[in-house]
Image (spheres, rainbow, N blue to C red):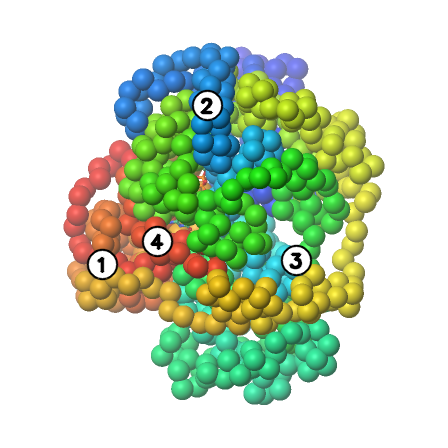
Amino acid sequence: MERTEQLIKAKIPGKETGIEIRRTICDICCPSFHCGIDAYVKDGRVIKVEGTKGHPMNDGLLCTKGLSNREYIYRRDRILTPLKRVGERGEGKFQEITWEEAYRICAEKLNGWKEKEGADSVLFFGGYTKWFRPWLHRLAFSFGTENYATESSTCFTSGFMAWKIATGRGAKGDMAHCGVYLGWAFNPYHSRYLNGKKADEAKARGVKFIIVDPRITPAVEKLADIHLRPRGGTDGALALAMANILIQNNWIDREYIDRYVEGFDAFAEYVSGFNESNLEAITGVPYSQAVEACRMIHENRPMAINESSAPLAHHKNGMQNYRAIMALSAITGNYDRVGGQQPILHTYIHQASGFLTEEEEFVDEVRPAHARKPVGAERFPLWYETEREAQATDMARQILEEKPYPIRAVVALGMNLRMLPDTENIIRALKKLDFFVDTDLFMTDAAKYADIVLPACSSFERGEFKTYPGGYAVYTNPVIEPLGQAKSDAQILCELAEALGLDDELLKSGYENCIRYMIRNLSVTVEDLKANPLPTLVPERKPYQEGAYIRGGLDTKSGKFELDSSLIKDHPEWGLDSLPTYCDSLDGADEEKYPFALCAGARIPNAIHSRLHEVPWVRSLRPYPTADISLEDGKRLGIREGDDMEIYTEKGSITVKAHPTARVLPGTVYMYHGYREANVNGLLDGNHLDPYCGFPSYRSARCGIRKGGEDHGTDA
Ligand SMILES: Nc1nc2c(c(=O)[nH]1)N[C@H]1C(S)=C(S)[C@@H](COP(=O)(O)OP(=O)(O)OC[C@H]3O[C@@H](n4cnc5c(=O)[nH]c(N)nc54)[C@H](O)[C@@H]3O)O[C@H]1N2
Ligand SMILES: Nc1nc2c(c(=O)[nH]1)N[C@H]1C(S)=C(S)[C@@H](COP(=O)(O)OP(=O)(O)OC[C@H]3O[C@@H](n4cnc5c(=O)[nH]c(N)nc54)[C@H](O)[C@@H]3O)O[C@H]1N2
Ligand SMILES: [Mo]
């Protein structure tokens, strides 16, 4: 082989090979990471990816998902041109059209409904990807509606709301300085591996770890000094009993409570009902273990607690359970302190970066004055009161029932058909729409129901502004041209504003100009950021100041940490409890027919929601949809490793491969979501929702299992 050929084969960058390293970010998982990527580019194509050394997030590391970026951006089903549906909804028959034609149809349909039934008859929806959200939100407002809904109807917001009603702001646990870490539903080794690294460092420093998880996970094995194993969704009862133990033993901070905590007496009285007599029966956790955990909390202060965006929230009682857990921080005086729970102000798109951007102004300055309340506002009034946006879990219902008013059209970016529970109902709703436009990288099952499909480009093909924890900002440059005619979502939204004839000059002036507006109060400019391939430290970043927020008075009615919420007390008509009360989370299905608890969602390292199941390299690591059951249940039902197993609920059934393991509790089934051929969300009840925030109970459905079922083949 020629030398040059050899060098090309080895992917060595340089003049001779024509291979260049260009920097971008991975946007496959959580926005707080979005690791730096070195893309090796030859002839306009990415041929290899590596983690960027010196990047403040990942410093050269990449996880399984990040390493799959090349296959991900070149997935076979990338959409390359705008498309118009020619077959039935869902059939997947489309014809290519031009961008002009696509925008013309969108404008005619959307403006048509706006004229006929008002702007609220159109709903704007964004899936997991967050980078375009300020543009989508502003577009909805400029169009004249508050009907803006996102994936955050199922993720993060529940916990954020719990914090807001208690303290007025979000918060995060300061693992770097704590003495004891309460890792409640904490397994970063599968879901946030960079936090796993931080946990390893804390462990090496001698931090005590209490892990609260029904399963035996890598976090339990590597970190736990104490492992509490409550049955899923019984966490509230455990937290309340722990509060009771802390109070009974006087392991609380009286002075702090007197000064900064509201509602302690009512809370203390309520928690006295969770004690030695009932804890184990409700949760499965022996009382003595809960006492040991409380002693550890007391003896190793300060205590930081894991913030949970999903596993604690995905239960009917999720937000209340979360409030009960966070109350432990207040009564032990660990809120707003170094090594405890620290209040945060959000920078751009919910990052805790320590400086402020004008993103809220960007959106709010065009908030429509006379819009009707958005989807879900009536059903989830606390959600609407704190979030002021639509709750997506009520979307299908409102489309189908037309109450309190009809929704005729949906403008979606990255809608996954299997994000919400009860897929059949979502399909019925999409079919009922008069007009549906979806924008995605891939020809997804949701896109197949759309009238118009628009091709979006990946993070490798666009320039993007981002901020990171630690005071950083970055503005990436595209590393390759967009594939086919794909465009960046933000560009699409700005052009759509133009096509709709909206009176919004800023939005119509394009992405970069909008960023200039949002960072106008920072001393770094778009040009500075673009010139630096690594994130830049923003001079305006402010370090955390211990106790400043709580001493100055919190943004709550009482100015204190509210264990007993005045916001909820002021609204008895909502029918919600002002204290973090506990109730059972499982749905009402017949216990005899459906004796197992189904947890649909605990993360697996090689998949993220709907997207990576379709990427061959990561799929090969776990080729089949697989569910974990206990060894005992496997034995009892004659189900062995790799057997086909049916999981069924009142809604239907799916067939998966069985994985009996000592890691899960008897009576439970763990199944990851997002699979086309084994859609666990199709088994879930769309009305089994948390009344406080509207979140789905993905993790507390009743189900049955049996050996056998349909063979779904080996070519998945
Ligand atoms: N690889 C990968 N990483 C991801 C994702 C992904 O899909 N794949 N998704 C991203 C997203 S969107 C999110 S929201 C985060 C979520 O990330 P995490 O919050 O880490 O979510 P999980 O892995 O679902 O749950 C963490 C642990 O909680 C336990 N758990 C489940 N139910 C309960 C319960 O009721 N009580 C208690 N105490 N523990 C419980 C599980 O057994 C699991 O070990 O992950 C992000 N990272
Ligand atoms: N059963 C069950 N269901 C769950 C959960 C669970 O634990 N269990 N978790 C919930 C949680 S926490 C979350 S965060 C959600 C995940 O939310 P989903 O929105 O379901 O997440 P994804 O499937 O990753 O992505 C959605 C779509 O966005 C597209 N997309 C990706 N990048 C871009 C882009 O740059 N532009 C555009 N326009 N589209 C893009 C993808 O191709 C995909 O079709 O799922 C929720 N659903
Ligand atoms: Mo999430």
Observer-nearest of 293 and 425: 425
Mark 1 lies on a secondary structure that is: strand
Label 2 or label 3, whichever comes before in sequence order: 2
Disc 2 versus disc 3: distance between alpha carbons? 40 Å
Check disc 2: other Cα within 10 Å, few if <14, some if 14-19, many if 20+: few
Disc 4 or 2, which lies upstream in sequence? 2
Whole-number angstrom distance, CA of label 2 to CA of label 1: 48 Å
Residue of label 3: 169
Q: Is residue 187 left or right of residue 430?
A: right
Cβ–Cβ below 8 Å for labels 1 and 4? Answer: no
How packed mark 1 is, by other alpha carbons closer than 10 Å (few <14, some 14-19, many 20 or more), is: many
Give SS at disc 3: loop
Q: Amino acid at mark 3?
A: Arg
Can you tell which quarter of the image residue 23 is in? top right
- Distance from disc 3 to disc 1, alpha carbons, whole Å, reads 41 Å
**For residue 442, what is the image quadrant?**
top left
Viewer-closest of 622 and 503? 503
Marks 3 and 4: CB-CB under 8 Å?
A: no
Residue depth check, mark 2 versus mark 1: number of the one nearer the observer: 2
Residue 687, labelled with which disc?
A: 4
- The image position of residue 265, as x and y in percent, is 60, 82
Mark 4 nearby-residue class (10 Å; few <14, some 14–19, many ≥20):
some
Label 4 sits on a secondary structure element that is loop
Percent x, y of residue 480: 58, 20
**Looking at the image, is mark 3 or mark 1 earlier in the sequence?**
3
Tell whether label 1 touches label 3 (CB within 8 Å). no
Residue at the disc numbered 1: 704
Q: State which tag comes first along the sequence, 1 or 4.
A: 4
- 644 shown above or below 75: below
**Which dot marks residue 112?**
2
